[in-house]
Each structure stands twice: as structure tokens, then as C-alpha cells.
Image (tube, grey):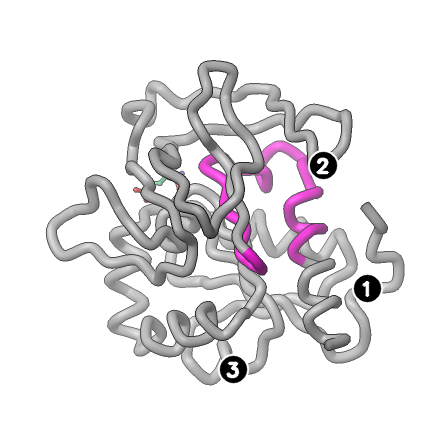
Amino acid sequence: MAPVSAGLGSGLRIGVLSLQGDVREHAQVLTDLGAQVSLVRRPRELEAVDGLVLPGGESSVIDKLSRVAGLQGPLCALIAAGLPVLGTCAGLILLADRLADGISGQKTFGGMDVTVRRNAFGGQVESFEADLDVPFLGPRAVRAAFIRAPVIEQVGPAATVLASLPDGRVVAAEQGNLLGTAFHPETTGETRFHQRLLNAVREQAMR
Ligand code: GLN
């Protein structure tokens, strides 16, 4: 994959939804890749970005806070309009069209034709790291941290599987400009998913 050598291109900006979760880790990876990063807490800040990261954290909390902040409607609309988005863990949950076991009233932003089950591997003590083969990223394995991670239980025809565990459970998928991982690439020095987001943002801007 082509590196983003001189930043993203003039004026292009990646937002990190900063309501809850591991915002700082994502901002660091993006900055290290040469992107201009801004933290998004309000609708006006969302309007100023060309791509977005939905961080890991607690999806039900991010869902609630996004409604309080007036971000949910604008976010759903932008995702539907083709905004490039990377969601990790809770972020993947928020991108799913269908949620298998959300808390009562929990909603997602949607956009990806997948069904996601929260906490599919158990609680915090069942967290683990694994080396994953992700062929579309090249031969080097992805070191993936699963922390109260979800699993992609069903993949609809509009979405594509990107990575599975050795037992076949799907843990990363893509649909157009949307990319979701059940694990946290941002905590293990893995930058290729963020790089893919930056490439999508650049391509979108050139259209
Ligand atoms: N279990 C969390 C949720 O439901 C996700 C955990 C994570 O993002 N590490 O949102």
C-alpha cells in the first residue's frame, strides 16, 4: 500500500470522535502517519473533517453521548453520504447496521451491512492478543488486541470480510469507505488500518 509521505494533502483533516474511549491512541497513530487530526465533540467540529475514527471504548456510552451532543443525526447522514470512517471495537459496533445484544435502547450510527455481537469473548479478564493473517494488508501478520471485543456474527452482501480468527469468527470487515475491526490496532503499533483510512480520504478528495 502506498505510504502517505507528505501528510494527507493540504487542508485534509481526520477527526476522532472524542466522547469517550481511547481517543489519544488513535490521534497519535494518525499524527505519526502525517495526518492533521482534530477531536470531534460537536456537530460543527464534525463538519470540518474529511474522515473520521470511531474509537474503542463503550459503545452504549458513546451512543448516548452522541445523542446528547446532537451528533447522532449528522453522523448517520455523513456516513450514509460516504464519509470515510474507521471504527475499532466499540467503533465497529457503532458502524453496524444490526446489533445482536445492545443494552436497552442502544442504537448504532449504522452504515455497514453486518450484525455485531458485543462482548462476544467475555469480559475484561478474557481479553487477549493474537496475530492475525489479513491478506489485503500484505504478508506481515496483524498484532491485534481484543478487549471486551465484539464479533461480526453475520456479514450481509454489501460488506466484505477482511479478517477472521483461526476458528472462522469474523473480526474485520469493510464496505465502501467504512472499515471496522473488532480489535484495537491502535494499541499494538499496527498502523495499516489507519493508513487505509487516509488513502480513502485522499481518494475521496480527488473525486
Ligand atoms: N464491549 C465494548 C462495547 O460494547 C467494546 C469494548 C472496546 O471497545 N474495547 O462497546
> Could you tell whether 116 is left or right of 144 in the image?
left
- Please provide percent x and percent y for residue 46: 49, 76
Q: Quadrant of the N terminus?
A: top right
Whether residue 184 appears in magenta in the rendering, the answer is yes
Q: For residue 137, which numbered disc appears in the image? A: 2
Which portion, as a residue range, is magenta? 176-197
Residues under labels 2 and 3: Cα distance? 30 Å
Q: Which residue is mark 1?
A: 7
Q: Position of residue 37 (x, y in %)?
A: 64, 66
Note whether 93 is above or below 35 in the view shown: above
Label 1 sits on a secondary structure element that is: loop
Q: Quadrant of residue 111?
A: bottom left
Dot 2: element: helix
Q: What element does badge 3 sit on?
A: helix
From the viewer's side, name the closer residue of 84 and 5: 84
Distance between the Cα atoms at labels 1 and 2? 20 Å
Q: Earlier in the sequence, mark 2 or mark 3?
A: 3
Q: Is residue 174 above or below residue 184?
A: below
Residue 112 placed where, x, y %? 42, 54
Q: CA distance from mark 3 to mark 1?
A: 20 Å
The amino acid beneath tag 2 is Leu
Question: Which residue is painted at 88% across and 57% down in the image?
Answer: 5
Looking at the rendered structure, the kind of residue marked 3 is: Glu
Q: Which comes sooner in the sequence, label 1 or label 2?
A: 1
Circle 3 residue: 47
Q: Residue furthest top?
A: 167
- Left or right, 207 with reference to 18: right
Report if the CB atoms under discs 1 and 2 are less than 8 Å apart.
Answer: no
**How busy is the neighbourhood of tag 3: few (under 14 within 10 Å), some, or many (20 plus)?**
few
Q: Quadrant of ligand 1?
A: top left
Q: Is residue 174 left or right of residue 198?
A: left
